[in-house]
Image (cartoon, coloured by chain):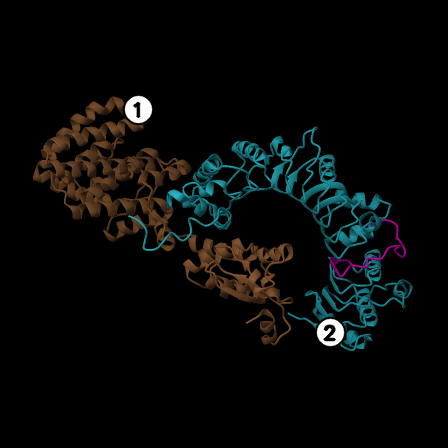
Chain colours: A brown, B cyan
């Protein structure tokens, strides 16, 4: 069918222009609607394209036929003069109700057609989707790969908050991965269990002390000795029991609490082991439970560990007050007295220790 | 770990879109996108608008804790940021004056800052560092509760279009020269200024908002003004000054604004305009003036009534008029007002051709009020609605008011009178 014939077929006196999408299909669009897109408008005015089928305007790659249909709907509505702001707003609100994938495509297409108001509208909608979501939820929504290590994820947080809790958590992650690696190796090569444990402990210690700088260096040896002794202790069934009690009690503690308060609750809830826990240096306690875990690690447990740590990270990422509530309510569930909070660097360290124990003991 | 089935929807969008998404997120959410994936690691770093609002760090009962974490947050934010920052806004009541502000402003002054808003908490006022005056590209500056002292070398903000100073301590000379040193200034808002005699010279000014105890207000070289809103407070000091003033305030303030579209005056504004010699018939016409709102007009002061009359009779296109009566003492009915005034001052030929809506509040029915209403009803051929809300203290005279109202001739057949009693 010739152009002239087409023109005759169209009953209205409207003028039309020809456009071609990336899949090669060519279609006619009302000129006044198409002109609403600055990119098409410029094409018509500057190059004179679009006047016939043979000179169709090629749309940018990012504009597929389905999305172009949507864009035309948008233009058709907004190019009509005299609509009230309220009408436009209502239209816009309805217009952006679509699945996320389409919304992303639409944003991209609108951008390539230089349709600024639509870019603003859709990117605002995307921002609404992101706002308030956890990183996991955002990743799921937009199919983002989770390709950062836990430390990398925490880096910006640490930079922003410089929170001792975060630093400690960082170390925890590093240690956990190292341990898992060690265990993997252990399984593969079937090395003697005891030896690997020893190495792991030393590595961890040097890691912790190394990272933390000189302040704790002096204590290293002492700690090591303590740790060995502890580990021996922990093989004793009775003391394991005590540990378990302790862990239950501790897990209910709020993450930030006053030193004294910790003492009290621990004293009330468990054995004298707890007093040791209130010491500022947390590392011996970490080792203290390590022994238990290392002895019998199965894949299911590993998974559990992963889950726990992730959960911990998630809670760290979320607001502290929320987290506080979460843990306080946990405490209430277990019928433990909620404890007044008081920000204090050293007590925080203990609490991280507590968290770690909780994770380990699961 | 990996994707959740399907290709990444958003990471490969053009940078401009990603930026557009990021700047619409609260700053906290924007920063947190850096832990999404490796592609998002540094995307937020180059956003050009940073808005620190109340929600950007979690609040808690201890103000100092919040303030500390805020300062840290902003420090790190700026430290991690890369490239130009066109808009920087702090609107956070937890933040108080702190030495870091100087560093932030210095940092911003080196990063192409165009819009700067600093609104800290109501503690000690902070002093704006002099490096602010090196921000040559500023188009919008909003400062709250601070001390401003332009250096001698300051030549002006050549691009500044909007200036808001709210409770800002600045010398009278400095404020005047600051205003006149911004040749493109379009919008100016000054509030809580004490005993300031201010002359504004701003050839491109279109919007003006003033609030405070002004001793004197003068508009010179402001031919483009379209919108004026003034709230004037009075102290004994200023009242005395007013008494002594002899030149005509009306002319000083409204003599050079032929393009005015909207005029709003609160508290002592009408009083201020009435001081000085009566201008007689105004030599100029406000042909664009469509809305006049004057609050707390005293209908016992003939000079104030005259100001209102001069204004409305010089505004042929006036559409909307709002007046509230503001005499503090309840009028005594025994007064014998000079009602000849109305015959003399109301030109019978002058009709308010476009006036559609009149709103009168706090009316107590004194003779001059009633004469004013009579005049409005008799000279407004297209009046649609006149709403009258009587003053709550004069219950007994309301009936009298109504009886009188019913009697008045109306130039507009459509005019609807709404008498609001609550």
At which x and y percent is residue B286?
Answer: 82, 57
The image shows residue A345, relative to residue A71, as above or below, that is above
On the image, numbered disc 1 is attached to which residue? A215
Give the camera-side residue of B316 and A332. B316
Calculate the distance from the C-alpha at mark 2 to the C-alpha at mark 1.
83 Å
Query: Is residue A52 in sight in this rendering?
Result: yes
Q: Which mark is residue B417?
A: 2
Chain for numbered disc 2: B
The image shows residue B381, relative to residue B230, as above or below, that is below
Crowding around mark 1 (Cα neighbors within 10 Å: few <14, some 14 to 19, many 20+) is few
| Residue appearing at x 25%, y 33% in the figure | A282
Element class at badge 2:
strand
Give the camera-side residue of B16 and B50. B16
Q: Where does the C terminus of chain B fall, quadrant-wise?
A: bottom right
Query: Would you say the magenta stretch is mainly helix, strand or loop?
Result: loop
At which x and y percent is residue A79?
Answer: 61, 64
Q: Looking at the rendering, which quadrant does residue A340 occupy? A: top left
Q: Which mark is residue B254?
A: none
Give the camera-side residue of B126 and B123. B126
Chain for numbered disc 1: A
């Amino acid at each position: 069918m010739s152009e002239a014939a087409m023109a005759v077929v169209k009953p209205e006196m409207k003028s039309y222009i020809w456009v071609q999408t990336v899949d090669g299909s060519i279609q006619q669009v009302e000129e006044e609607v198409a002109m609403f897109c600055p990119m098409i408008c410029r094409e018509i005015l500057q190059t004179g394209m679009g006047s016939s089928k043979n000179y169709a305007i090629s749309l940018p790659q990012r504009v597929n036929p389905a999305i172009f249909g949507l864009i035309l709907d948008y233009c058709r509505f907004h190019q009509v003069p005299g609509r009230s702001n309220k009408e436009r707003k209502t239209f816009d609100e309805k217009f952006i109700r679509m699945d996320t994938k389409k919304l992303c495509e639409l944003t991209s297409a609108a951008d390539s057609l230089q349709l600024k108001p639509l870019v603003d509208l859709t990117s605002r909608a995307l921002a609404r989707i992101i706002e308030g979501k956890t990183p996991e939820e955002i990743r799921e929504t937009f199919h983002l790969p989770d390709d950062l290590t836990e430390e990398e994820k925490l880096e910006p947080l640490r930079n922003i908050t410089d929170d001792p809790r975060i630093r400690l958590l960082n170390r925890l992650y590093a240690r956990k991965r190292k341990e898992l690696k060690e265990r993997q190796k252990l399984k593969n090569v079937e090395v003697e269990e005891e030896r690997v444990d020893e190495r792991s402990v030393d590595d961890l210690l040097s890691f912790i002390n190394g990272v933390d700088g000189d302040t704790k260096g002096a204590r290293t040896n002492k700690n090591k000795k303590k740790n060995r002794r502890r580990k021996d202790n922990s093989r004793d069934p009775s003391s394991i029991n005590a540990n378990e009690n302790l862990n239950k009690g501790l897990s209910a503690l709020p993450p930030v609490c006053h030193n004294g308060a910790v003492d009290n609750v621990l004293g009330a809830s468990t054995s004298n082991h707890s007093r040791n826990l209130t010491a500022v240096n947390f590392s011996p306690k970490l080792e203290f439970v390590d022994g238990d875990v290392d002895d019998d690690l199965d894949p299911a447990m590993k998974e559990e560990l992963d889950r726990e740590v992730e959960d911990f990270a998630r809670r760290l990422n979320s607001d502290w007050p929320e987290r506080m509530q979460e843990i306080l309510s946990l405490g209430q569930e277990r019928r433990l007295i909620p404890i007044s909070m008081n920000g204090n660097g050293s007590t925080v360290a203990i609490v991280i220790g507590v968290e770690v124990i909780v994770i380990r003991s699961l | 770990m990996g994707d959740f089935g399907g290709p990444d929807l958003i990471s490969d969008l053009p940078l401009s879109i990603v930026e557009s998404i990021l700047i619409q997120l609260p700053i906290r959410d924007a920063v947190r996108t850096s832990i999404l994936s490796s592609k998002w690691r540094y995307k937020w770093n180059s956003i050009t608008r940073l808005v620190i609002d109340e929600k950007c760090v979690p609040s808690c009962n201890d103000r100092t804790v919040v303030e500390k974490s805020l300062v840290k947050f902003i420090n790190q934010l700026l430290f991690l940021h890369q490239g130009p920052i066109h808009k920087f806004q702090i609107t956070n009541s937890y933040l108080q004056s702190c030495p870091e502000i100087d560093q932030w402003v210095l940092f911003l002054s080196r990063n192409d800052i165009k819009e700067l808003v600093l609104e800290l908490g109501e503690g000690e006022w902070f002093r704006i560092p002099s490096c602010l005056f090196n921000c040559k590209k500023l188009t919008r500056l909003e400062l709250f509760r601070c001390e401003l002292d332009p250096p001698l070398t300051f030549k002006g903000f050549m691009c500044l279009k909007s200036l808001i100073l709210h409770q800002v301590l600045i010398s009278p000379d400095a404020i005047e020269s600051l205003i006149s040193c911004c040749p493109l200034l379009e919008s100016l808002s000054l509030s809580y200024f004490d005993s300031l005699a201010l002359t504004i010279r701003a050839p491109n000014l279109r919007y003006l908002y003033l609030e405070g105890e002004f001793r004197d207000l003068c508009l010179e070289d402001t031919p483009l003004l379209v919108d004026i809103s003034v709230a004037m407070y009075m102290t004994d000091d200023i009242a005395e000054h007013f008494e002594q003033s002899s030149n005509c305030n009306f002319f000083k303030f409204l003599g050079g604004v032929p393009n005015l579209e909207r005029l709003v005056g609160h508290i002592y504004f009408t009083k201020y305009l009435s001081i000085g010699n009566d201008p007689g018939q105004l030599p100029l016409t406000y042909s664009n003036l469509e809305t006049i709102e004057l609050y707390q007009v005293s209908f016992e002061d003939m000079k104030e009534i005259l100001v209102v009359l001069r204004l409305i009779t010089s505004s042929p296109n006036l559409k909307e008029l709002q007046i509230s009566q503001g005499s503090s003492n309840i009028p005594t009915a025994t007064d014998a007002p000079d009602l000849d005034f109305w015959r003399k001052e109301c030109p019978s030929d002058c009709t308010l051709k476009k006036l559609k809506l009149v709103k009168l509040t706090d009316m107590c029915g004194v003779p001059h009020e009633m004469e004013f209403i009579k005049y409005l009803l008799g000279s407004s051929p297209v009046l649609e609605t006149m709403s009258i809300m009587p003053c709550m203290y004069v219950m007994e005279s309301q009936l009298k008011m109504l009886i009188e109202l019913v009697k008045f001739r109306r130039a507009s057949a459509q005019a609807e009178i709404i008498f609001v009693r609550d």
